[in-house]
Image (tube, rainbow, N blue to C red):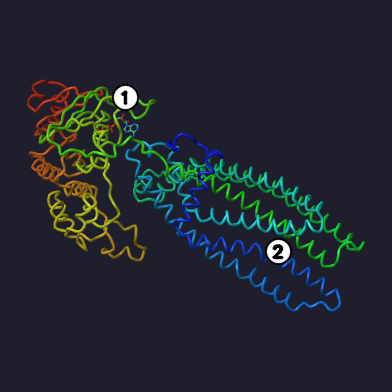
Amino acid sequence: MSDPGASRRTGTRELAPAAVEAMALTWRAAPGGVAGYGFLTLAEAAAPIATAWLTKTVIDRLTTPGGAVAGLAAGLAAAGLAAAALPGIGRYLRAQTGRLARADAIDRLFAAAERQVGLRRFEDPVFLDRLRLAQEGAGTTGDLVSGVCGTLNGVLSLAGFVASLLILSPAMTALVLLAAVPALIAELLLSRRRATMQWDIERIHRREFFYSRLLTGVQAATEIRLFGIGAFLRARMMAERRRADVAEARMDRRELVTQGGLTTLSAAVAGAGLWWAVTAARRGSLSVGDVAMFVAAVAGVQAALDTLVSSLASVHQRLLTFSHYVAVIRAEPDLPSADRGTAPALCQGIELRDVWFRYSDDHPWVLRGVDLTIPHGRSVALVGLNGAGKSTLIRLLSRMYDPTRGRILWDGVDLRDIPPADLRERISAVFQDHMNYDMSAAENIGLGHLPALEDPARIEEAAVRAGVHQTLSGLPRGYDTLLTRVFFSEADKGDPETGVVLSGGQWQRLALARALVRDGRDLMILDEPSSGLDPEAEHEVHAGIREHRAGRTSLLISHRLSAVRDADLIAVLHDGRIAERGPHEVLLAADGHYARLFRLQAAGYQEAQ
Ligand SMILES: Nc1ncnc2c1ncn2[C@@H]1O[C@H](COP(=O)(O)OP(=O)(O)OP(=O)(O)O)[C@@H](O)[C@H]1O
């Protein structure tokens, strides 16, 4: 279970730990509910057996002169009452236990996903499929318990009715039981097939979900309309839907045929039994009560077998799904992480020593022996063409991945020897693909440093420094304004106080404020912090950043070379290596890649004059 992305299918071996985990989880979440439900299961199983015996005895006494039946009738009424009331109480307990177990399971699942310190698992389609099935498994933990209770109910009812039937006819008992064996095997095979089918169509569902999100989300809405690609995307979505439907229909047909055959078999056995009982009664070897008991017992055995077989099949299938949950919560972190030690406060600097990296064995090398030092208290800029590997290098610095070869040293300590959370505590960053959270303006900034959520002055200070304070304070509810409209109904949408939508550049400033609120960190990473800003805003933001970077350790990535010229050191990433390094003037004088790019950009501006 250490590598939840390794295997596409779940084997029977994984079912036992899944069963133990599900039981333990449900017991922890709702011990009272499980105990109550277990008790009700016993009572529910006992009620029909008691009813059958009481009925037989009442009939026998009624057909015998002078037999007292009042007490038996009362018992029969009590058993009937129990049979009527218990299922309702059981349903409530089952639902309540299910809710508690589900909440616990979902919480643990998401905590486990968070334990994946890097990004690799989230780029692995097999893991993503597993994660989705795990969510499904977590959501139905309670059903698993009710399936187990159903199985228990089936076993108990079966035992009671089989014992009753044995007294009347051992041969008929054997026949009824034998008829159940193919049903049991067939149902288990069917549930395994259904679980395999679910796993196989998981990718189809993921693609369908992707298209449906595109078609219903606001992000792609403009392009979809402008390019007129709605029908094209819908056709693709429906093609995926139909592929999934075909697989499901095939499965349903298989179930229909198998279950139809099994039902016919049960009916034939019941008919033969009835014929035997009636002839035996006519011969005088069975009483009228015995015939009633026999009919009830055959029906009871078949109903119990039915419950047992379908509960077992459902438990089996749910366990197959739940085993994905177990695989995810027991998954080792994707990166080996030290759990002891701390990231020392940066005094000397960060050194990349012969760092090689590729995203996987079948991807090309992105970095091919990068040697770079980011000295403490200095500003370093990283430039390079699209796809040169700049953002990749940042992901390695914040340990979203480990270098394939080589080492990254934080004051001489390998990043692998520092707990990732500790390392990240010392870093602040604005990412090129920053997040826009559907939350309030204050929360969008405060997420950069959670204690700041209680400190409005600190949030405001960061907003001022990112140049977004004026925008935010002018919103209908100031910093408490929601920066989204997704939570409001159509009727609310006319009211500006229900949420606003910011522009791309305003969001970018907000992302900068989120990084700045994390003040006092040892390393500030700025990956294209101003790409969506207007020239005035860009100038203003870079002036602010320059001031902020003075005397601090920072790494800035920007294609706008005028923004990086003041860096203490500029490194040019080319062909996976640092091709040039030095201050602006030195690189210009060297007349290499940097000088060529800088002159190209400068010429563009001059032409415009
Ligand atoms: N998650 C990923 N899986 C596989 N390959 C990736 C992944 N992310 C990036 N790459 C590849 O790695 C290379 C470097 O990408 P990276 O984003 O680091 O470049 P960059 O220098 O930041 O580019 P840009 O200037 O366009 O932002 C590219 O060829 C890209 O296709």
Residue drawn at x 70%, y 64% as measured from the top left: 49
Q: Position of residue 31 (x, y in %)?
A: 47, 60
Q: Which residue is labeled 1 in the image?
A: 365
Pick the front one: 283 or 555: 283
Q: Quadrant of residue 565?
A: top left
Circle 1 residues within 10 Å: few <14, some 14–19, many ≥20: some
Q: Position of residue 359 (x, y in %)?
A: 34, 30
Residue drawn at x 11%, y 30% as measured from the top left: 569
Foreground disc of the pair 1, 2: 2
Residue drawn at x 25%, y 57% as measured from the top left: 440
Split into quadrants, the picture shows ligand 1 in the one at: top left
Q: Do residues under tags 1 and 2 come within 8 Å of each other at their CB atoms?
A: no
Would you say the beta carbon of the disc 1 residue lies within 8 angstroms of ligand 1? no
Horizontal side of 95 relative to 369 (left or right) equals right
Of the two numbered discs 1 and 2 on the same chain, state the one appearing first in sequence: 2
Q: Quadrant of the N terminus?
A: top left
How far apart marks 1 and 2 lie (CA) works out to 71 Å
Q: Which mark is residue 207?
A: none
Q: Position of residue 345 (x, y in %)?
A: 15, 39
Callout 1, which amino acid? Trp
Pick the front one: 21 or 264: 21
Q: Position of residue 65 (x, y in %)?
A: 86, 77
Horizontal side of 262 relative to 127 (left or right) equals right
Residue drawn at x 42%, y 55% as measured from the top left: 104
Horizontal side of 465 relative to 527 (left or right) equals left
Callout 2, which amino acid? Ile
Please say if 78 is above or below 585: below
Q: Quadrant of residue 250?
A: top right
Q: Which residue is labeled 2 in the image?
A: 49
